[in-house]
Amino acid sequence: AEGLNLCTSGSATSCEECLLIHPKCAWCSKEEFGSTKSITSRCDFLQNLVANGCAGAIESPSSSISVLRNVPLSSKGSGQSQLDVTQITPQKVALNLRPGDQTSFRVQVRQVEDYPVDLYYLMDLSLSMNDDLDNIRNLGTKLAEEMRKLTSNFRLGFGSFVDKNISPFSYTAPRYQNNPCIGYKLFPSCVPSFGFRHLLSLTDKVDRFNEEVRKQKVSRNRDAPEGGFDAILQAAVCKDKIGWRKEASHLLVFTTDDVPHIALDGKLGGLVQPHDGQCHLNEANEYSASGQLDYPSLALLGEKLAENNIHLIFAVTKSHYILYKNFTALIPGTTVEILHKDSKNIIELIVKAYNSIRSKVELTVWDSPEDIGLTFTATCQDGLSYPGLRKCGDLKIGDTVSFEVAVEARSCPAEDTSHTFTIKPAGFRDTLEVAVTYSCQCGCTGQAAPASGKCSGNGTYACGLCDCHPGYLGAHCECEEGASGDLHHALCREAEGKPLCSGRGECSCNQCLCYESEFGNIYGPFCECDDFSCARYKGVLCSGHGECHCGECKCHAGYIGDNCNCSTETDSCVSSDGQMCSGRGACVCGRCQCTEPGAFGDTCEKCPTCPGVCSTKRDCIECKLFNSGRLADNQTCQKHCKDEIITTVDVLETDDPNAILCAYPVNNCVMKFTYLELPSGKSNLTVLKEPACSSAPSAVTIVLAVIGSVVLIGIILLGLWKLLVTIHDRREFDRFQSERSRARYEMASNPLYRRPISTHNVEFTFNKLNKSYNGTVD
């Protein structure tokens, strides 16, 4: 093979060492192999060994699988012998693994119809649950009617809890011994506090459930948190007293209206001993270790619930829903539903939770060895394959899903070591047992010949090589240590004129014995090679991703470059939305180099100035705050929005210049939010509690506005008309005055002017008294 050849690195001196180098490496056990003039490695790829004439004497084991038990899947659960119901196939397989050689097998799982159900109802009987107790007095009959629509084989049990009857969790003063409600005006009488009390083992006689519920009375504890986790653990591990059937589906309904005490809370009451995970019910079916053991941890709860195939259903009030929703992520196989304050919706809640449990399948692995690697690929009802997933959802009763399980051994344990681990669907009693053995020994090793003549009687012949006794060396153990080899020194030079054994060894018995070095291993027929003179990256030889061979880094699969520092893998560049570098950069050496201006982050997922960012943030807001949108599935939301810190406010501040304002329509309103990228790589999202909605104007307002507008326009037009008339009159008057000033005559000499008084001179002669006069008569 050309290029990189890990098998011929020269470090394998035996068949077993060769098999550990790479799963494709093979060993030639043929006695006469290669030539005397050149070194031909016995450890090589299979095709190379065949080409070099080693056909028929090659050691190359591979991983194998054999199915030991494979009972077909059942279709119904209650119509046949219930112990014969099969929901997973195969049931037992055996693997023989060669390190690095991955093998796989297929697992099928089916939720069969009419599967038996055991339901244990665990109720908080603290004082605040008094109204709930009144509403479930006939729960058994109604619940049985609903559950028998889903299964013909249903049993019901009942238990209750309050809290540890020690201070400061409960009232322990003598006056409260028999009635902790003394002095409490709202409810003056109640029973003494208790940790957990098992009241009714699982039974198909639902009337007994109703009778037990009617007998119960509430109690009173001092602090708000309850001791419910104590009760859950006892209900899970005391399987004989509770009556859990092996052949049934186990449901544990936990109802409460407050938060639980968890591990280490017991120290407040002087309880320092951790919970031992054992059953501690006394003859009266009460939890006897309540005053000795601390509350159980979430990890212990998850372990014991899984061991006993119990599905835990948290039925809690709305105010505590988020807390218990977070618990479901830490305790596999649990669900949470919102319980009304008076428990009126409990039957609907249980049926809904049961259908939710039956609609999904998730594989869990128990006792997996540390040197075994497991990968899962789920094939769900849509027929698509989902690498890396081990669960399927949205299933109907009777649907079958399959999982491809790939198994790989990372190393070889001690000889004759075997392991067994279990694959189990969460909440199922059915399991798949996987037995593992290791193929780390070569077949030719078992045919070793001590003191063989092929080794000059001085060694053991095995797998084509001589393992010389102490004091002897040579290909056939033909030389003794210290024997003179001056006549054959030429065989210890790589070429004429080159130093003897490259100056890094001694020539003995026609072969070089390389010196030891504190830096690493010196090897090769002429000591010309070593495993420490290669390029380094940040002080690490071959970046830790390759092997140094004769001054050259032989990179592991998935790495390239002179110093193997460049990864060819692109998985780390895939963003949460499935795009390479979020579509804003290129994957170079396994890391994203962002090319979009303003983009940053491990996968270029942060980009405040990029278009479309508001849409991505919107998806996280909808799934985290409102459990809606395309990321509504809890795990999908957690995966895509793990870096989003969301805060709700009444009034949105937009003063921060670094914050980006986004908005999107919601039912004819607008939801606004701002986001700010933090130095830690997370995003701070500030969201309005309610969408901003504008109210439509009334009809009266519109009419008045129109009338006012018309009147205003009329006044403005009249004013403009008056202004124009005034301007025109003034211009005419100014023109008149101008013309008057330009007149060339006086008013007195106006030729058209006539005085109103006329004067006339008359000449006449008359005779008066016989006298004649000439004159004027005035």
Image: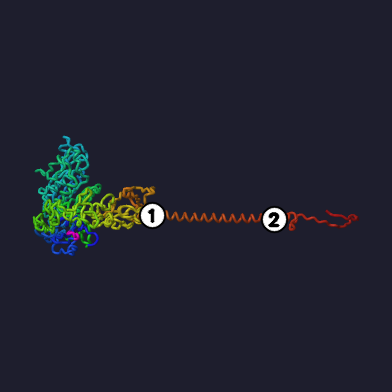
Q: Nearer the viewer, residue 427 or 82?
A: 427
Q: Is residue 38 magenta?
A: yes
- Tag 1 secondary structure: loop
Name which residue type carries label 2. Arg
The structure residue drawn at horizontal position 88% and vertical position 57%, both measured from the top left corner, is 766
* Dot placed on the residue nearer the N-terminal end, 2 or 1: 1
In the displayed structure, 576 sits above or below 178; it is below
In the displayed structure, 748 sits above or below 57; it is above
Q: Position of residue 610 (x, y in %)?
A: 36, 55
Residue 234 visible within the image = yes
Q: Give the magenta range.
A: 37-44
How many marks on residues? Answer: 2
Query: What is the crowding at mark 1: few (fewer than 14 residues within 10 Å), some, or many (at least 20)?
Result: few
Q: Is residue 12 magenta?
A: no
Q: Position of residue 250 (x, y in %)?
A: 14, 52
**Which disc is residue 696 wearing?**
1
Q: Position of residue 675 (x, y in %)?
A: 34, 50
Q: Nearer the viewer, mark 2 or mark 1?
A: 2
The figure's colour scheme reads rainbow
The part of the image, by quadrant, that contains residue 46 is bottom left
Check the picture and name the quadrant holding the N terminus. Answer: bottom left
State how far apart marks 2 and 1 are (Cα). Answer: 68 Å
Q: Nearer the viewer, residue 470 or 427?
A: 470
Q: Nearer the viewer, residue 204 or 639?
A: 639
The part of the image, by quadrant, that contains residue 730 is bottom right
Q: Nearer the viewer, residue 381 or 670?
A: 381
Q: Position of residue 307 (x, y in %)?
A: 14, 50
- Tag 2 secondary structure: loop
- Residue ID for mark 2: 742
Position of residue 450 in the picture relative to residue 560 (left or right): left
Name which residue type carries label 1. Ala
